[in-house]
Image (cartoon, helix red, strand yellow):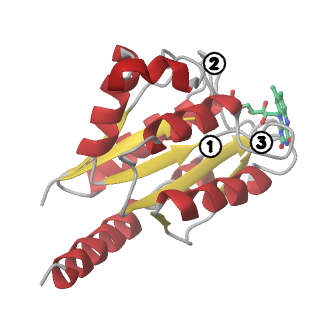
């Protein structure tokens, strides 16, 4: 089976640690799980949400392209920093654009990673889960990966590449995402009979 994972980073920084976590997951999971493709979906070109931009029943081209990528994915991987105890603004903006009717996120499995300051991003992850309830995203519960990006030992190089072996092991949660996605696909098929 081929599983297409749309991976979204909540940080737009060039040397983002969270985007680095996605690159590491793509490399590690891509090597160890045949058929798993993790593609980073860039959210930096999305305009700030404003429903006036939907006038005439069309989304702006950047939003349309983003929604197409979300729709085409089998499951999702989110990597986001915590900003002031919550979701990053860019990620919330992307979640909201994808949620405009018809909701593009529905009924897919998702996993989450975060690199942040003192909390490692735990508070933001629980806020993302809460948003996911309404969007009908099925977040897996384990493994929980909270990376304290700025505490020693050094986990990322100057370009945001993951260099810490313990975190690399944690990001290898791809097998779990595969299992969940297969379960969801099976359950969806049962429901349609
Ligand atoms: C932060 N940071 C942060 N960290 C944390 O653990 N809890 C928090 O509430 C906040 N709040 C916060 C607000 C704002 C506006 C900024 C810019 C930063 C720190 C932040 O999560 C950390 O620098 C991450 O490493 C940034 O992720 P990227 O850009 O490296 O992916």
- Vertical position of residue 144 compared to residue 52: above or below: below
The residue nearer to you, when weighing 162 against 107, is: 107
Queried on whether the Cβ of the residue with tag 2 lies below 8 angstroms from ligand 1, the answer reads yes
At 62% from the left and 55% from the top, the residue drawn is 131
* Separation (CA) of disc 1 from disc 2: 20 Å
Task: Please state the quadrant of the image where ligand 1 appears.
Answer: top right
Asked if the residues shown at circle 1 and circle 3 are in contact, with their CB atoms under 8 angstroms apart, the answer is yes
Q: How busy is the neighbourhood of tag 1: few (under 14 within 10 Å), some, or many (20 plus)? A: few
Q: Which quarter of the rendering shows the N terminus? A: bottom left
- Vertical position of residue 124 compared to residue 159: above or below: below
Q: Is residue 112 visible?
A: yes
* Separation (CA) of disc 1 from disc 3: 8 Å
- Sequence-earlier tag: 3 or 2: 2
Residue 77 as seen in the image, left or right of residue 129: left
Name the residue carrying label 1: 164
**Residue 84: x percent and y percent?**
86, 39
- SS label for mark 3: loop
* Separation (CA) of disc 3 from disc 2: 22 Å
Name the residue carrying label 2: 13
Q: How busy is the neighbourhood of tag 2: few (under 14 within 10 Å), some, or many (20 plus)? A: few
Name the residue carrying label 3: 153
The residue nearer to you, when weighing 125 against 37, is: 125
**Residue 144 in which image quadrant:** bottom right
The residue nearer to you, when weighing 68 against 126, is: 68
**Residue 82: x percent and y percent?**
76, 41
């Amino acid at each position: 089976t081929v599983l297409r994972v749309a991976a979204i980073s909540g940080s737009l920084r060039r040397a983002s640690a969270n985007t680095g976590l996605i690159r590491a997951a793509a490399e590690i999971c891509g090597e160890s799980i045949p058929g798993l493709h993790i593609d980073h979906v860039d959210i930096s070109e999305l305009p700030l949400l404003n429903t006036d931009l939907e006038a005439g029943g069309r989304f702006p081209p950047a939003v349309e392209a983003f929604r197409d990528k979300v729709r085409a994915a089998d499951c999702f991987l989110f990597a986001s920093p915590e900003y002031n105890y919550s979701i990053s603004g860019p990620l919330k903006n992307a979640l909201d654009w994808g949620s405009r009717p018809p909701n593009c996120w529905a009924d897919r499995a998702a996993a989450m990673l975060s690199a942040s300051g003192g909390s490692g991003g735990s508070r933001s992850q629980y806020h993302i889960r809460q948003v996911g309830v309404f969007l009908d995203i099925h977040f897996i519960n384990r493994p929980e990966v909270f990376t304290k990006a700025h505490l020693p030992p050094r986990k990322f190089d100057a370009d945001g590449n993951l260099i810490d072996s313990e975190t690399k092991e944690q990001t290898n949660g791809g097998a779990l995402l595969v299992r969940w996605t297969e379960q969801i696909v099976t359950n969806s098929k049962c429901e349609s009979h």
